[in-house]
Each structure stands twice: as C-alpha cells, then as structure tokens.
Image (spheres, rainbow, N blue to C red):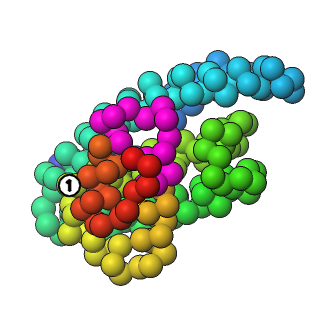
Amino acid sequence: MIILFYYNFALILVYCYAEVSHSNKDSFDKSTPDTFSNKKEELNVDSFYKEYPLLLKIKKREQEAALRTILTKNKDEKQLMLRQLFIRIFETIKESKQLLFKYNENEEDFTKLATDKESREHFARIIENTIFLAGLTLYFPKYALYYVNKDVNFHQIYSWSNNFCANLTFLDLETKELLNLAAQEIEINNSKI
C-alpha cells in the first residue's frame, strides 16, 4: 500500500514537471504589470530576461529531482513514466510553438518573442520542457532515440526546440552544454551553439 502511494505521488510529481509552468508565476506576474505604453512594455521584457534565468535555475533543480525519482523505479514503472513524459513533453512543446508564433510573425528573431504575458508563457514552456527533455535524453538515451527515430514530427520538434534554446543569449553555459550533449546523443545538429 505504501509503495503504491509513493508510486502515485512520484507519477503526479513527474506529470507536474511535464506540464511545466512557472513555479513562481503569480509573484513574477505581479512584478511585471500590464501596461500599454511602449516604454513600460520594454521594461517588462527586460524584467523578464533578468528574472527568468533565476526562475529557470529553480525549475532545473526540480527537474533533476524528478529525473532521480524516475531512476529509482523498476523497469515497468520507468517505461510507463518515460513513455508518458516523452509524449506529454512533445505535445507541450508543439502546442507552445504554434501558439507562440501565432502571436509573433518573425520566428527567427528570438529577442522579441517574450513581449506579452501570453507569449512569455509559451516561451517559458518551450525552454523548460526542452531542458527537461535534454535531461531525459542524457539519463535515458535509449528511450529518446526510440521516439526520435519512431516519429519524424517528434524529431523535428525536438530539433527545433533544441536549436531555439541553444540560440538564446540568457541561458547559462551549463544549460547550453546540456542541450548540446543531448543533441549529440540523438544526432541533432545545433546551429550557433
């Protein structure tokens, strides 16, 4: 009974990470008020680029804990969790990409993507899920290769999101190395790393 409780708790915890939303979203949104003036909007974007890397470090620690939890599971539980995670992360990145670029016309200009609340949310989901996917790839390369080789769409989304994150200037070197190693593991070519 206790084992079942811990399994369900771990499964819920892992789903929460796959859903990936800001851990401090409410306080972050309060610190960047909605305004209509261009000057204040620029400050919001600057604030986002200053505060988000700090929030991302917290998220990365949580993701690392989730990865360690998955490692403790038996083979069948691990396979089930990984299958659900890979599928959920793929769907989240795909959906966030579509919605992000619905509001932003120029896909190549990464500096202008996080200009409003809606865009910031999708921007953050792509980054956080891609980093989590990179961690999953390094911990479980066999599963990552299976999904990349099985589904062309998965490969394209993973490749796009990895390149998208690798080209962001505010990510730290450790995160960029993680993305690069994951890309090498499944043979994705990152440009501008």
Which residue corresponds to the image point at 26% horizontal and 52% vertical from the top-left?
Answer: 181
Q: Position of residue 84 (x, y in %)?
A: 37, 65
Q: Quadrant of residue 65?
A: top left
- Any part of residue 144 in sight: no
Q: Quadrant of residue 113?
A: top right
Q: Position of residue 15 (x, y in %)?
A: 40, 53
Q: Quadrant of residue 75?
A: bottom left
Q: Is residue 2 left or right of residue 84?
A: left
Q: Is residue 81 magenta?
A: no
Query: Which of 71 and 93 lies nearest the eye of the viewer?
Result: 93
Q: Position of residue 60 (x, y in %)?
A: 35, 37
Which residue corresponds to the image point at 75% horizontal and 54% vertical from the top-left?
Answer: 105
Q: Which residues lie in the magenta part?
A: 162-176
Q: Which residue is mark 1?
A: 139
Under mark 1, the amino acid is Tyr
Q: Position of residue 148 (x, y in %)?
A: 35, 73
Does residue 88 sit above or below 62 in this rendering?
below
Q: Is residue 43 left or right of residue 175?
A: right
Provide the major secondary structure of the magenta segment: helix
**Total label count?**
1
Does dot 1 land on a helix, a strand or a loop?
A: helix
Which residue corresponds to the image point at 24% horizontal and 62% vertical from the top-left?
Answer: 185
Does residue 56 sit above or below 4 in this rendering?
above
Which residue corresponds to the image point at 81% horizontal and 20% vertical from the top-left?
Answer: 39
Q: Is residue 167 magenta?
A: yes
Q: Is residue 48 left or right of residue 149?
A: right
- Any part of residue 164 in sight: yes
